[in-house]
Amino acid sequence: MERNSQNKMILEHMQNIGAIDDNDARDLYGCRRLPARINDLRKSGHNIQTIMTESKNRFGKTVHYARYILMGA
């Protein structure tokens, strides 16, 4: 899928649904490089905040991952 198409889908997700993480981007939009798409959106003027989140994985280990939220949406 083309980068600009993914950028548009990710932006629309943040505008209409809210925060997005790597799993959402991969499962919903086939995007395997969410941080790169977020960088593209930031360069085009969108104010996107990174929120570091902590949870347990399926093995019970604590993992940290980024969620991205569009500010002012």
Image (cartoon, rainbow, N blue to C red):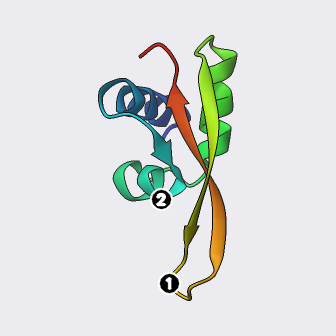
Q: Which numbered circle lies on residue 14? A: none
Cα distance between the residues tagged 2 and 1: 14 Å
Nearer to us in this view, 37 or 67:
67
Tell me, yes or no, if residue 31 can be seen here.
yes
Nearer to us in this view, 56 or 18:
56
Q: Position of residue 50 (x, y in %)?
A: 64, 36
**What residue lies at 60% left-to-right and 17% top-to-bottom?**
47
- The answer to whether residue 52 is left or right of residue 67 is right
Mark 2 crowd level (few <14, some 14–19, many ≥20, 10 Å Cα): some
Going by the numbered disc 1, the residue's amino acid type is Arg
**What residue lies at 47% left-to-right and 13% top-to-bottom?**
72
Tell me, yes or no, if residue 41 can be seen here.
no
Quarter location, residue 59? bottom right
Mark 1 crowd level (few <14, some 14–19, many ≥20, 10 Å Cα): few
Label 1's element?
loop
Nearer to us in this view, 64 or 25:
64
Q: Where is residue 60 in the image (x, y as percent from the top left)?
A: 56, 85
Nearer to us in this view, 70 or 41:
70
Q: Position of residue 43 (x, y in %)?
A: 69, 18
User: Farthest residue in the bottom direction?
Assistant: 59
Judging by the rendered image, the residue that carries numbered circle 2 is 23
User: Farthest residue in the left direction?
Assistant: 16
Q: How many labels does the image show?
A: 2
Q: Which numbered circle lies on residue 58? A: 1
Quarter location, residue 5? top left
**What residue lies at 46% left-to-right and 43% top-to-bottom?**
20
Up-down: is 36 above or below 49? Answer: below
Going by the numbered disc 2, the residue's amino acid type is Asn
Q: Position of residue 13 (x, y in %)?
A: 36, 33
**What residue lies at 47% left-to-right and 59% top-to-bottom?**
23
